[in-house]
Image (cartoon, helix red, strand yellow):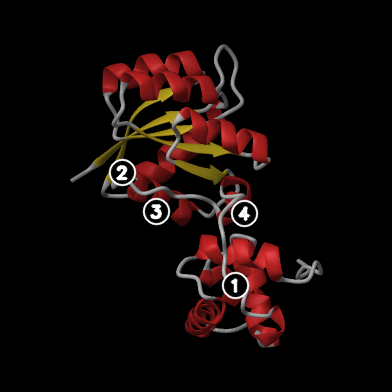
Amino acid sequence: MTTSVLLVDDHQLVRAGLVALVDSADDLTVVGQAADGREAVRSALTLRPDVVLMDLSMPVMDGVEATRQLVAGMPDVRIVVLTSFSDKGRVAEALAAGAIGYLLKDCEPGQLLSAIRSASLGHAPIDPRVAHALLPQRALPADVAAAELSPREDEVLRLVAEGLANKQIARRLGITERTVKAHVGSVFRRIGVGDRTSAALWARDHLPAERHDH
């Protein structure tokens, strides 16, 4: 079954790139585009897309207000914010308005496609780099000292916290993707988490401030 997508962004070049990316996937199809929030609401109510990719900063009506109006008129719509803003205020506003996911525009193409599929199933795709803003009160296991991680596990966890995929981490560290996967699994078990978002949150709360240099 094909997932229909409405693209909302005030930059035509961005929309063109997104159309090419989304339509390259066999199971996804772009059914419409909008350049501002008001046009997005009008288009969505007409086209009834499964997923709306929503920019935040736009003329006429911003993405937060458009999201609020869309959710009111189409309770089943899945809105994924795609923006360059990762500050806590904007993230919280978008989620409070009813967005189901939040991605940054510099995410990997594959991550974006996966997020659209995930949102269409009712899941909440969140970029690990903004997870700390979304879940500020979330309790995380604190009984594992960061010192118990090996130097390599520490490196891998820091890169996971930056939002890098296994393939990117492998390239950065000069090791195989299979090795990265093994390290990630080991780190998850050690710190008591089950997903990358929770690992990113744990890293921000428990790892020393020194970050891995790019």
Badge 2 element? helix
Q: Residues within 10 Å of mark 2 (few under 14, many from 20)?
A: many
Identify the residue at horizontal 68%, vertical 77% (top origin): 155
Q: Earlier in the sequence, mark 1 or mark 4?
A: 4
Q: Which mark is residue 129?
A: 4
User: Amino acid under label 4?
Assistant: Arg
Q: CA distance from mark 2 to mark 4?
A: 22 Å
Q: Residues within 10 Å of mark 1 (few under 14, many from 20)?
A: many
Asked if residue 52 is positioned above or below residue 202 in the image, the reply reads above
Residue 32 in sight here: yes
Q: Nearer the viewer, residue 101 or 110?
A: 101
Looking at the image, tell me whether mark 2 or mark 4 is earlier in sequence order. Answer: 2
Left or right? Give the position of 77 relative to 164.
left
Residue found at x 61% / y 26%: 57
Instruction: Using the numbered discs, state the Cα–Cα distance from disc 1 to disc 4 in whole angstroms.
Output: 15 Å
88 above or below 214? Answer: above
Circle 3 packing at 10 Å, graded few (<14), some (14-19), many (20+), is few
Residue that lies at the very extreme toward the left in this rendered image? 1
Where disc 3 sits, the SS reads helix
Of labels 2 and 1, earlier in sequence is 2
The residue type indicated by label 2 comes to Ser
Q: Nearer the viewer, mark 3 or mark 2?
A: 2
Quadrant where the C terminus sits is bottom right
Looking at the rendering, which quadrant does residue 80 occupy?
Answer: top left
Image: 51 above or below 180: above
**Cα distance, mark 3 to mark 1?**
18 Å
Q: Which mark is residue 120?
A: 2
Q: Position of residue 98 (x, y in %)?
A: 44, 31
- Foreground tag (3 vs 4): 4
The residue that mark 3 highlights is: 114
User: Which residue lies under the disc numbered 1?
Assistant: 169
